[in-house]
């Protein structure tokens, strides 16, 4: 048996440590790019902050928002793979609040561009037809009349004169009709403000009690999570 011959590195092979570090970096980079792509173009998480859409969605519901459904698109490959369509009456949308674009709101689309909307004694009519939205509810029996002596903020809740919705905008209202700050008070939602359609509830946790620390919130995950709402579609 002849003398041992030192092993020669395979031509073109990189040192193991350098190769491993590069692989980890590539995996991390791909994960970051994929996450940014998904968040920017496909879906985004949103937490419901108020009771204006109860009982369709609750305070503390964590929603996934379909961002590509209404997105502008051409005739390329994505337009064949992903379902696109215009905003429709009855859609629950997430949008930038027109008076403060840093805040996101969630409401239901009641009227589309070109529609004529009227609210008389809480009853909503669109193009002369009474709205038939089974998820809308009224938590207060009292109806505010169209009385000039009342503040406009009260009258607008239950009385809106016939109003044509301008092009490129949507009239949106909360399903909790008597406790919702919506288009009745600040006007239609511009199309450019719409982020997407609320898709489903992926997690639901009631708001924490004041002064409850991080350790307490960790315990709440198991004891207070509304498991029955997990993966609940938003209709």
Image (cartoon, rainbow, N blue to C red):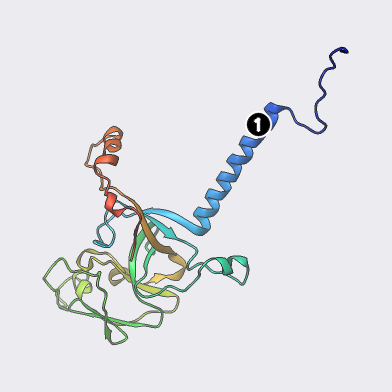
Give x and y (percent) for residue 191.
Answer: 45, 70
Residue bearing mark 1: 20
Horizontally, residue 56 falls left or right of residue 17, namely: left
Please report the residue visible at 52 percent of the width from the left and 49 percent of the height from the top.
35
Quadrant that contains the N terminus? top right
Give x and y (percent) for residue 143.
Answer: 13, 74
Give x and y (percent) for residue 49.
Answer: 30, 54
In this view, the residue farthest toward the bottom is 128
In this view, the residue farthest toward the right is 2
Quadrant that contains the C terminus? bottom left
Please report the residue visible at 60 percent of the width from the left and 40 percent of the height from the top.
27
* Residue 13 visible here: yes
Q: Quadrant of residue 25?
A: top right
Nearest to the observer: residue 169 or residue 44: 44
Q: Quadrant of residue 108?
A: bottom left
Please report the residue visible at 28 percent of the width from the left and 87 percent of the height from the top.
128
Question: With respect to residue 8, does 41 lie above or below?
Answer: below
* Residue 95 visible here: no
Mark 1 residue element: helix
Counting every numbered tag in the picture gives 1
């Amino acid at each position: 048996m002849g003398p041992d011959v030192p092993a020669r590195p395979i031509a073109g092979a990189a040192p193991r440590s350098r190769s491993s570090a590069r692989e980890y970096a590539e995996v991390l980079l791909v994960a970051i790019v994929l996450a940014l792509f998904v968040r920017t173009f496909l879906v985004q998480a949103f937490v419901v902050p108020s009771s204006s859409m109860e009982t369709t969605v609750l305070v503390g519901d964590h929603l996934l928002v379909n961002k590509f459904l209404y997105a502008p698109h051409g005739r390329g490959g994505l337009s064949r793979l992903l379902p696109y369509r215009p905003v429709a009456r009855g859609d629950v949308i997430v949008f930038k609040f027109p008076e403060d674009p840093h805040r996101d709101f969630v409401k239901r689309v009641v009227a589309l561009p070109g529609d004529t909307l009227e609210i008389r004694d809480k009853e909503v009519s669109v193009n002369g037809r009474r709205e038939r939205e089974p998820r809308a509810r009224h938590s207060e029996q009292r109806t505010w009349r169209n009385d000039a002596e009342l503040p406009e903020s009260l009258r607008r809740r239950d009385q809106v004169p016939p109003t044509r919705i301008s092009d490129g905008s949507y009239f949106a209202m909360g399903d909790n009709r008597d406790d919702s700050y919506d288009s009745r008070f600040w006007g239609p939602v511009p199309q450019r403000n719409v982020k997407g359609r609320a898709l489903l509830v992926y997690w639901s946790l009631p708001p924490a009690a004041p002064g409850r620390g991080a350790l307490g919130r960790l315990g709440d995950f198991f004891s207070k999570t509304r498991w029955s709402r997990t993966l609940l579609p938003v209709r």
